[in-house]
Every structure is written in structure tokens, then in C-alpha cells.
Amino acid sequence: MDSIKTTPLIKNPSSPSFYYLSLEGITIGDTRLPIKKSAFALNQDGSGGMIIDSGTTITYLEQSAFDLVKEEFTKQMQLPVDKSGQTGLELCFSVPSNSQSIEVPKFIFHFEGGADLDLPGENYIIADQSGVACLAMELSWNVHLWELSAAEYVSGS
């Protein structure tokens, strides 16, 4: 049995009602992305940081992290990018009409203290009946917001 790993919650005096985590990195498939730790840092002025929120449908990442996630995820998916914009999400893929399921690369969040969260695909892919599957992540300009349980929002997968 694997040993239990934990990561501390961080207080932000500017936003005391939110739960912040110390995210240190992201892996897509077997590729640890070269994201600077400062991209996830909670700044002294209260900006930035990573909030965990069970009531948010998608995950929001700041620009430098999001761009690297988007680039690597696109490289590793075995499906063409859907550029129709019909979902309103930044990165979507066209799913063949005869597909019952799709293969997606692993998505792992690395937290302070050595805690790694290897998410199941239904937590970061939103699929629908129209033949589109999207990465359930968007760009944020100030704070990272991680959706704790996006699985209940997946439909048609």
C-alpha cells in the first residue's frame, strides 16, 4: 500500500474564506512541464496562488502554466483539435462518431510535501454528444482555481 502524502493548506489574509494549496508542478503523460514554481505562488499582496474549490466546474490556470499545459496536452492527444469554438472552452478535440471512449494522457498535479494527485480522465475532460471532448481548463489572469471534482459535470462520455 502506498504511503499517505499530505500538503498543507495556506492562509491568505486577503481572502480568508478560500482554501489555498501549494502547487509545485504539473505532469502531462510522462512529461513534467517546465513551469516556474513562481507561476503558482501566493504573492505577498494576496494575488496569485492556487485555490481548491469543489463548486467550480473547470480549473483555471495562469497564462504561462496554461500555455504549457495546452501545448503538451495537444501533442499527446491522438485526436485532431476542434477549432469550432462551439463549447466556449479553449482546447477541444474532435471525437470520431464511432468512438465509445477516448484515450487521454495522464494529468498529475504535484503539491508541496511530495503529494501527487493523478486525476482520472473524467476529472479534466468534458465530452458531449456532439463529438467534441474538451480539456476542462481555462486561462485565468490572477489566481489558479482547481476544481476538486469535475467528474459530475461530464456528460456523454
Image: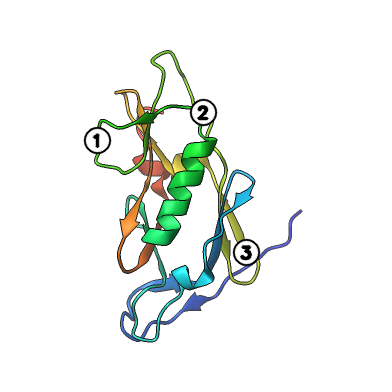
- Left/right placement of residue 12 relative to residue 30 reads left
Question: Which numbered disc covers residue 78?
Answer: 2
Work out how far the residue at label 2 is from the one at label 1, CA to CA, in angstroms.
19 Å
Say above or below: 58 vs 36: above
Mark 3 or mark 1: which comes first in sequence?
Answer: 1
> Residue 29 appears in which quarter of the rendering?
top right
Name the secondary structure under disc 1: loop
Q: Residue at x 48, y 73 (%)?
A: 38
Name the secondary structure under disc 2: loop
For this orientation, the residue located farthest to the right is 1
Mark 2 or mark 1: which comes first in sequence?
Answer: 2
Report which residue position mark 3 lands on: 115
Three-letter code for the amino acid on which mark 1 is drawn = Gly
Three-letter code for the amino acid on which mark 2 is drawn = Gln
x%, y% of residue 24? Answer: 55, 67
Closer to the camera in the image, 19 or 37: 37
Name the secondary structure under disc 3: loop
x%, y% of residue 57? Answer: 32, 50
Contact, mark 3 vs mark 1 (Cβ under 8 Å): no
Q: Dot 1, crowdedness within 10 Å: few (<14), some or many (≥20)?
A: few
x%, y% of residue 113? Answer: 64, 71
Q: Dot 3, crowdedness within 10 Å: few (<14), some or many (≥20)?
A: some
Say above or below: 129 vs 55: above
- Left/right placement of residue 110 relative to residue 88 reads right
Question: Which numbered disc covers residue 85?
Answer: 1
Q: Dot 2, crowdedness within 10 Å: few (<14), some or many (≥20)?
A: some
Say above or below: 15 vs 95: below
Q: Residue at x 43, y 13 (%)?
A: 98
Closer to the camera in the image, 118 or 62: 62
